[in-house]
Image (tube, rainbow, N blue to C red):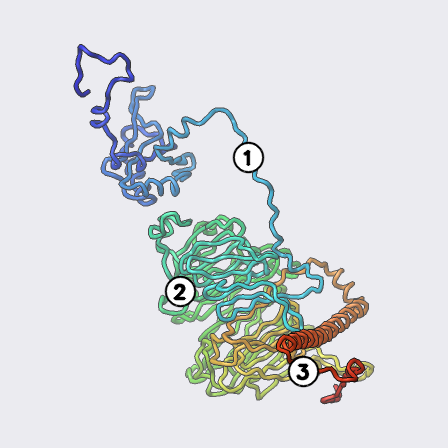
Amino acid sequence: MPGLDIHHLPEREEDIDFSDIYEKHAVTQEDDFDNLVVVDGAPIVDQKKEEKLLAVLTKLFTKGAGPIKEGGLWMPLSPNDEGKMESKGYLFIEFETNEAAHAAVKNLDGHKMSKSHQLSVNKFTDVEKYNNMSDEYVEPAIAPFEPKEHIKSWLADEQARDQFVLYRGEDVSVFWNRKSEEPEHVHSRHNWTETYVQWSPLGSYLSTFHTQGIALWGGPSWNQIVKFVHPGVKLIDFSPNERYLVTWSNEPLQPAKFPAGAPNPFSEYDQGNQVVIWDVKTGAMLRSFPSVQDNPSKTVHWPMFKWSKSEKYFARVVPGQQLSIYEAPSMGLLDKKSIKISGIVDFEWSPGRENDDKLVQKDADVLAYWTPEVGNQPARVTLMSVPSKEIIRTKNLFNVNECKLHWQSNGHYLAVKVDRHTKTKKSQFSNIEIFRLCEKGIPVETLEIKDPVIAFAWEPRGERFATITSGDPNYTTQPAAAQQQQATIKTALVLYHLDRTSKAGQTGFVPFKTFDKKSCNYLFWSPKGRHLVTATLRNSSVFDLEFWDLDFEPLNTAGDAKSSAASSSATQVQLLTTKEHYGVSDIEWDPTGRFVVSGSSMWRQAGDHGFILWDFKGQLLFKQNIDKFKQLLWRPRPASLLTADMKKKIKKNLRQYAKQFEEEDLAAGDANAAKLIAARRKAVEDWYSWRKATERRVAQERKDLGKELIKSADEGKSEIIEEWVEEVIEESEEIVD
């Protein structure tokens, strides 16, 4: 104490000057306790095992948090009842940085070292805070309830209309479809997304892409519901029931480079990963994965993770090595190990539903995968039951170039399109191997096709499928992936069905109709089946759209019993119409199967951007040319809540409902006509009002200038007569067969 005089001591303690002591023992910024943590729950060991335990803990905290100061790990020891020194179950760790201490609390609090030892990690500075907590319970304030908007509110539309999202220029808009009338605007935003938009599978959310991550929007007011931080995200994929979201970025995660204060759900464990799985309801990050590709320079195979119909499992392929199946929501490997499958290329989950009595494997999820030929080992298609991992069927294949797995929508059939080559490898052809999962033993049927199959598609919920084949020699020069522009090649449309008329009682898939001399290269089934659109897309000279009805019922044969008895599936296929949309690049069916949109996107075409709305018969309903048109996507609908009996009753009384709908359509048409006439009359009234006001103003100006017009003798006796003349410009009559 400065200038202490023993003869003149301070009378009170408050008068004593401690400044020199404070200065001598001052705690500098470098000596604070923010980089110190307290760890509880550590194993209690004796002095012999102390060094080994400290080594394990040092490795754990260095990897999970950051570097520890030299000599910065201290574990107190004390004698036990037997007089031997042993640890107390807690220790202190001093890190080199405050950030490392924060990471230790975030990443390792709750870490299980064993079944009976779970670590509790807290900052040293929090000990005093927790020690000073009041023992008296104070009931927390409950925030007032704020009802959230219904994310499926659009399904309650009185007219049962469907919505679609339109992306043009920098604007994203949502519209109601109004058939032949201009779509009704719902909501728009400028720069709503930076790359493109995407609906969730059931239509609950609209996804927008941003530099920092993904945002989901919905509800009547289109507010942001949840966002996911993933810098540079490029691709996303939802699980079938919208519970989980998978995001991918070509930029590896670097949690340390996140700005201070910015949301950062990642830890050191996520360093370098590119794929993240999220919980859609809570927005929580569940797990991240590294991106596994056989050749990083090639295009990413998406979706990288594929979900089972039940959402209990998801899986991915490590090309040529293994199949990894994970469980949800734990995100851990099924049975804690991957399945080693040499040469594996691709796989697909069955879309079959649980407890489907028709399926052989009705209580389990099923997936199919294929492996190529390696040496003397043939190519192979395998069906596996999950979670048992039991192989339930295999099929060997030879001279294979490529396989594509196509499940029927109910999971009752699996079609494997096999691209094969002759022994000389000079020509190619295709096989279709069909696995029947509703029959004992899962028999496999082989369809040999002399030409390569360039397109294949099952009829939704049906037992028919369509193929497009080509024997054109120019086809082999076409790249496998769709390009911006393709040359025109000659193709054939072939339709197959399950023939149950065999006298031997055997059933099999057979072609029931073939259409040659076509140029189509894409197939688009209606979501409800029956109707099919074949299109020539992304072509430099042909832009045809063909509308087919596979259950056409001619009116002139309805009463002809003999003709009806002789009719077959082949006679029921009808080409309804052929249309052309210049520059067409995309086709989109609406969820009801009543309407289809053809679009010409600036992403694929140089000019004539816009879209055309057709009905399922190919009749043009609405056309709009849009500069910088990019994307149009129908909003998906969830599965109907109606039971099979309720649907059957509706179909039975359809004529009664049809009258009601026709009256509503007529009323809407009359209302629109009345609205148009009223608008025209208002325009005429506005014109006369403006004219009279102008006449009065001019008359006043003339009067002020002394140039007032002299009234004629018969003023006031004139009468204005309006005459409306209607003229028919053109009238045509068309006879429909």
**Residue bearing mark 3:** 576
Position in image of residue 403 (x %, y %): 48, 72
Front-most of 153 and 572? 153
Q: Amino acid at mark 2?
A: Gly
What is the number of the mark on residue 141?
A: 1
- Residue 197 against residue 91 in the figure, above or below: below
In the rendered image, the vertical position of residue 182 relative to residue 351, given as above or below: below
Q: In the rendered structure, find residue 320 and report the number of the disc placed on it.
A: 2
Question: Is residue 475 visible in this depiction of the protein?
Answer: yes
Observer-nearest of 15 and 362 = 15
Q: Report whether 555 appears left or right of 255.
A: right
- Farthest residue in the front direction? 706
Camera-near label (3 vs 1) is 1
- Name the residue located 23 percent from the left edge and 38 percent from the top edge: 70
Instruction: Please provide percent x and percent y for residue 36.
Output: 31, 35
Disc 2, SS: loop
Comes first in the chain, label 2 or label 1:
1
Which residue occupies 27% across, 17% down?
15
| Amino acid type assigned to the residue bearing label 1 in the image | Ala
- Relative to 100, 414 lies left or right: right
